[in-house]
């Protein structure tokens, strides 16, 4: 049984929200161990993530806690979510032929460093089956047959729904999702883009960067939307390069950054640290 819970709140910003939430938690005999909040002056929205542990008999069930929070929720018209801190998010991973991000995620999970439960890997190619099955995870080969991409996407969506996946991760899945599928997965589908957006879109980004003599490489993890590569950004990172680096060095370094950025985004989403704020995100990073 868990001894910690994660409370997330989203509402219009107003005076007294933090005090009201803290008072409600105190009345439920909850001890706060971590708390972050942010009021966005541009959108007028307020976001809060609080981790706490019950210390007495007043916190009996989630339903009881909902009753405690109800007056505060009504007062501020809050979207309130409560999750056990040890509740692991189910993740379905989509990949094509580049396996570095997939392998990094599975290795982190296998080592107990990523708080998710992979429920399957889907791919439009069969190349990575052996690696996935080594980890004991179901592999679903979903090729595009006779150019019928709609039928392939229907099978992909079925894999998401039948597995009970809370999050879909595009770990270098080199297929553009349809607008309809993007809408169905809104807020629960993360993509890794192999450049520091918005530069060097399209094919062979590291070759483009090398040809331009850039001094940094980057990667971007973002939520998937119908606007290709324009979804709310969760995390970005860069690495410096110079004139002596070859294209092969660019590719190797770029893969390292992609691995890191995607793993961070998945972890923060799984820990319920990421909030959608229009076209942007609010991310309460650990220790921030």
Image: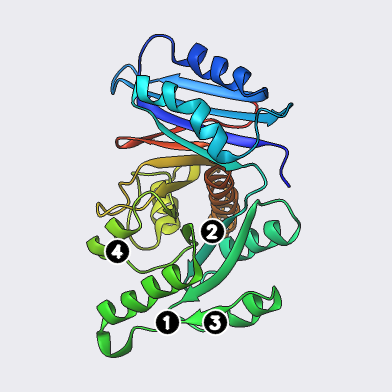
- Spatial CA distance of label 4 from label 3 is 24 Å
Pointer 3 local density, CA inside 10 Å: few below 14, some 14–19, many at least 20: some
- Spatial CA distance of label 1 from label 2 is 27 Å
Give the structural element (helix, strand or loop) at label 3: loop
Residue where numbered disc 2 is placed: 251
Residue where numbered disc 3 is placed: 127
- Spatial CA distance of label 3 from label 2 is 20 Å
Q: Nearer the viewer, residue 194 or 67?
A: 67
Pointer 4 local density, CA inside 10 Å: few below 14, some 14–19, many at least 20: some
- The residue located at (42%, 44%) in the rendering is 196
Q: Nearer the viewer, residue 239 or 91?
A: 91
Residue where numbered disc 1 is placed: 142
Q: Earlier in the sequence, mark 3 or mark 2?
A: 3
Give the structural element (helix, strand or loop) at label 1: loop
Q: Nearer the viewer, mark 3 or mark 1?
A: 1
Q: Earlier in the sequence, mark 3 or mark 1?
A: 3
Tell me where residue 255 appears, x and y as whole percent.
Answer: 56, 56
Residue where numbered disc 4 is placed: 181
> Compared with residue 103, is residue 80 higher up or lower down, i.e. above or below?
above
- Spatial CA distance of label 4 from label 1 is 16 Å
- The residue located at (29%, 20%) in the rendering is 42
Tell me where residue 110 appears, x and y as whole percent.
Answer: 73, 62
> Compared with residue 100, is residue 234 higher up or lower down, i.e. above or below?
above
Left or right of residue 24: residue 232: left
- Whether residues under marks 3 and 2 lie with C-beta atoms below 8 angstroms apart, the answer is no
- Spatial CA distance of label 3 from label 1 is 12 Å
- The residue located at (52%, 45%) in the rendering is 269
Tell me where residue 147 appears, x and y as whole percent.
Answer: 26, 85
């Amino acid at each position: 049984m868990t001894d910690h819970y994660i409370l997330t709140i989203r509402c219009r910003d107003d005076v007294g929200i933090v005090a009201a939430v803290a008072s409600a938690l105190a009345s439920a005999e909850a001890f706060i161990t971590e708390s972050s909040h942010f009021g966005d002056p541009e959108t007028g929205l307020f976001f809060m993530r609080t981790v706490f542990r019950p210390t007495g008999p007043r916190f009996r069930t989630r339903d009881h806690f909902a009753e405690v929070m109800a007056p505060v929720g009504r007062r501020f018209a809050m979207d309130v979510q409560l999750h056990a801190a040890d509740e692991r998010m189910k993740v379905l991973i989509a990949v094509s032929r580049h396996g570095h991000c997939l392998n990094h995620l599975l290795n982190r999970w296998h080592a107990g460093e990523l708080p998710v439960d992979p429920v399957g890997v889907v791919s439009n190619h069969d190349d990575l089956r052996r690696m996935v099955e080594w980890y004991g995870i179901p592999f679903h080969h979903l090729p595009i047959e006779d150019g019928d991409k709609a039928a392939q996407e229907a099978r992909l969506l079925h894999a998401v729904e039948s597995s009970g996946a809370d999050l879909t991760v595009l770990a270098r899945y080199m297929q553009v999702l349809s607008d309809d599928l993007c809408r169905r997965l809104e807020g629960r589908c993360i993509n890794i883009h192999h450049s520091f957006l918005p530069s060097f879109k399209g094919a062979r980004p590291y070759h483009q960067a090398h040809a331009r003599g850039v001094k940094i490489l980057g990667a971007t993890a973002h939520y998937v939307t119908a606007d290709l590569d324009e979804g709310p950004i969760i995390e970005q990172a860069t690495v410096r390069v110079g004139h002596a680096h070859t294209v092969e060095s660019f590719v190797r370094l770029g893969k390292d950054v992609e691995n890191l950025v995607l793993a961070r985004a998945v972890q923060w989403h799984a820990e319920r640290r990421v909030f959608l704020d229009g076209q942007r995100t609010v991310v309460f990073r650990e220790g921030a």
